[in-house]
Amino acid sequence: MSEAPYPLDGTSGAQVVPVSDALGGEIRGIDLSRDMGDATFVAIHRAWLRHLVLLFRDQDLSTAGQVAFSRRFGDLDLAPVDEYGRKHREGFPEILVVSNVVEDGEPIGSLGALESKWHTDMSYDERPPRASCLLSVKIPATGGNTGFLNMYEAYETLPPALAGRIRGLTLKHDATYNSVGLLREGAAPVTDVTASPGTSHPIVRTHPETGRKALFLGRRNAAYINGLSVEDSEALLDEIWAHTTHDRFTWHHQWRVGDLLIWDNRCTMHRRDGFDTRSQRIMHRTQIMDDRPPSSGEMP
Ligand SMILES: [Fe+2]
């Protein structure tokens, strides 16, 4: 049983409807295409910190509207170079198109129709994005659902012995593969996880706004726990991941056109189901930059 719906402060009639026991809240009664006062945004932001992922349905939102709403959460990053080596688009350089649609022989976006495994966006950066925001433009009849995972809960429920073993350790987040396992532009396949390109972050991070601790795992593929033998790193990572990717920490969202989701990368992971390559899925993503690295919340 999810928590009961409650009013969104600072609004007349808007509500927060928790969508699962694990995480996620739907905000009802807010039209994101209209100007939003600061009090409303503060309440939305508070709900976001509490539920980790917010869902707004039935939004008729332009690309400019998505950019404007995302920007309330912080400065936006430009879309990364995609797997085809393409830089950001003209007009809206903040928008990454996630799609399997091919027009005139050229894919219009990234990631195709493949499944993506649990990950946190761009965790191989020094300062991974604070948040990601996805707006659905076109969706297949089935498949392509997006799952989210509560990394606070994954941390808080670690068996004490396992929590003790990972205390103080850092993890190298590999930069070679994207979330569907394809090589990034110009990258070479990983043959030695200790030597592949990436950035190290603490395995346990402290969220700078909530003060809560969360696991920060990035992605499983080609990850490496610094200072351990590869064998020991693999074994410990398998143990941590087996605990973390448990259904009770997750919520899976089934998309409709006009859904906007915004999630906190500092305390969640996400994944998506693959879908039929003959159907079409188009999503627009923005990312909110973080000015602090994951280690910044750590107490001395
Ligand atoms: Fe992602």
Image: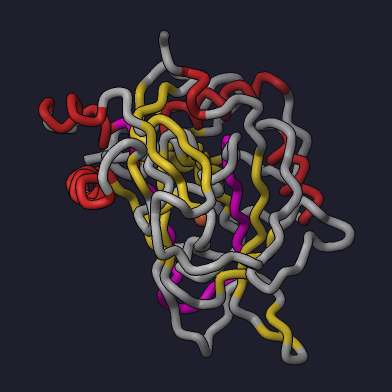
Q: Foreground: 273 or 244?
A: 244
Q: Is residue 193 left or right of residue 31?
A: left
Q: Foreground: 107 or 261?
A: 107
Q: Foreground: 222 or 112?
A: 222
Residues in magenta? 130-152
Labels in figure, total: 0
Q: Is residue 240 left or right of residue 212?
A: left
* Residue beneath the point at 69% across and 43% down: 32
User: Can you say whether 44 is above or below 82 in the image?
Assistant: above
Q: Residue furthest right?
A: 91
* Residue beneath the point at 21% across and 52% down: 231
Q: Residue furthest top?
A: 300
User: Can you say whether 12 is above or below 124 in the image?
Assistant: above
| Residue 145 seen in this snapshot | no
User: Can you say whether 16 is above or below 33 in the image?
Assistant: above
* Residue beneath the point at 77% across and 91% down: 104
**Horizontal and vertical percent position of residue 86:** 75, 68
Give residue 115's quadrant in the image.
bottom left
Give residue 283's quadrant in the image.
bottom right
Colour setting: secondary structure
**Horizontal and vertical percent position of residue 102:** 68, 85
User: Can you say whether 107 is above or below 104 in the image?
Assistant: above
Quadrant location of the N terminus in the rendered image:
top left
| Residue 267 seen in this snapshot | yes
* Residue beneath the point at 39% across and 69% down: 273
Quadrant location of the C terminus in the rendered image:
top left
Q: Magenta includes 262?
A: no
Q: Is residue 127 left or right of residue 116?
A: right
**Horizontal and vertical percent position of residue 149:** 34, 45
**Horizontal and vertical percent position of residue 160:** 12, 26
